[in-house]
Image (cartoon, helix red, strand yellow):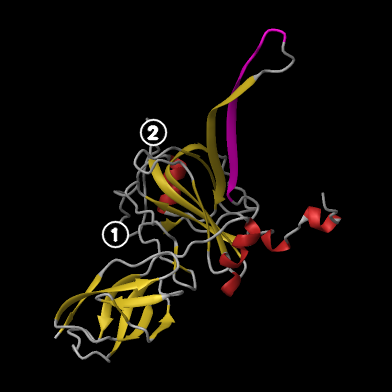
Amino acid sequence: MPAVTYEQLADWKSSLVLRPNKGFVLIGDLDATIPTAFTDGVAAEFQALTDFESLGMTAKDAPPSWTPEVETNDIEAWGALEPPRTDIISRKMTVSTTLIETKRRTLELYGGLDLSAIEADGTTGELQWNDPTSPESRYHRLVFGLVDGAGADTIFHLRILPRAIVTSVGEQSWSQEGGLTYNITWSAKIDEDLGYSVKNVFCGPGIAARLDEMGFTATAAVPIVSSHLPAGTLAAAGGESVVLLGKNFTGTTGVTVGGTAADDFQVVNDTTLAINSPAKTAGAHNVVVTNATGASANYSVTYA
């Protein structure tokens, strides 16, 4: 076996030491759409989560804290010093945090009720409601996010709970030494349609450069062509400057129109690809853009 140094054995990667410098907690109803991807494009820009709203600021000394609970069961054997078999029979995840903004959603979570029908007095702005005498089980979708780094080095770590229920709330002190707080603990439950209770996501412009050190590989998505400019028919003689619009054009290795290569193409950016149209007979022809992963779906253009 070859000799190695301590540094080679330890293989430290300081770039993988993340710090939760800031973060957010978002809430949505059970029909809120959870996107298949949270970032888009070469710049890995974070996309708006339109079906969710923020629960606001959390206490600095009580940010989201995650507690996985694993329950096991042993099979004992006569004469054996240790169980010959151990099975995991339950794995649960809870998360607690302390919210410090007095919002309707927060009041609902803390009180275990629905306040959507409560209206303030039109003159005084006064609000009133009663605590429930028989609280109902209320489920929500939650997105927890931490952010590390800035600019092109920004990393988001998300945990998505598609079906979460409040399982406990903490005491609330009305001391003048601090503001009102709402300590809430949720339990993650499996969403039957999505098939999971917690989804983990690492994303943002800073993650791609760290994938190899993290032990992961990346596969480019196949190109998608959605439209072209100028819109309309192309000249059968070819030689026109055409701009294809879509996504995943970075890394394009080839473009064909009706099976004929458009050799002179240029990737403007991940969503824009410029080509010179080849000559083709009049009629419909399919444009196909290819990268290392594969070919796009056919996009039809008409020659005349």
Under mark 1, the amino acid is Gly
Q: Residue at x 56, y 49 (%)?
A: 98
Q: Residue at x 44, y 61 (%)?
A: 38
Disc 1 packing (10 Å; few <14; some 14–19; many ≥20): few
The furthest residue to the top:
78
Q: Which residue is mark 2?
A: 135
Viewer-proximal residue, 144 or 272? 272
Image: 64 above or below 259: above
In the picture, the disc for residue 122 is: 1
Q: Position of residue 178 (x, y in %)?
A: 62, 53
Query: Is residue 10 rendered to the left or right of residue 234?
Result: right
Q: Secondary structure at mark 2?
A: loop
Query: Is residue 56 rendered to the left or right of residue 302?
Result: right
Viewer-proximal residue, 247 or 71? 247
Magenta stretch: includes residue 72:
yes
Q: Residue at x 46, y 65 (%)?
A: 220
Q: Position of residue 36 (x, y in %)?
A: 39, 56
Under mark 2, the amino acid is Pro
1 and 2 marks in contact (CB < 8 Å): no
Magenta stretch: includes residue 191:
no
Which tag is nearer the camera, tag 1 or tag 2?
2
Q: Secondary structure at mark 1?
A: loop
Viewer-proximal residue, 29 or 131? 29
State the predominant SS element of the stretch in magenta. strand
Q: Quadrant of the C terminus?
A: bottom left
Viewer-proximal residue, 192 or 176? 192
The magenta stretch is 64-79
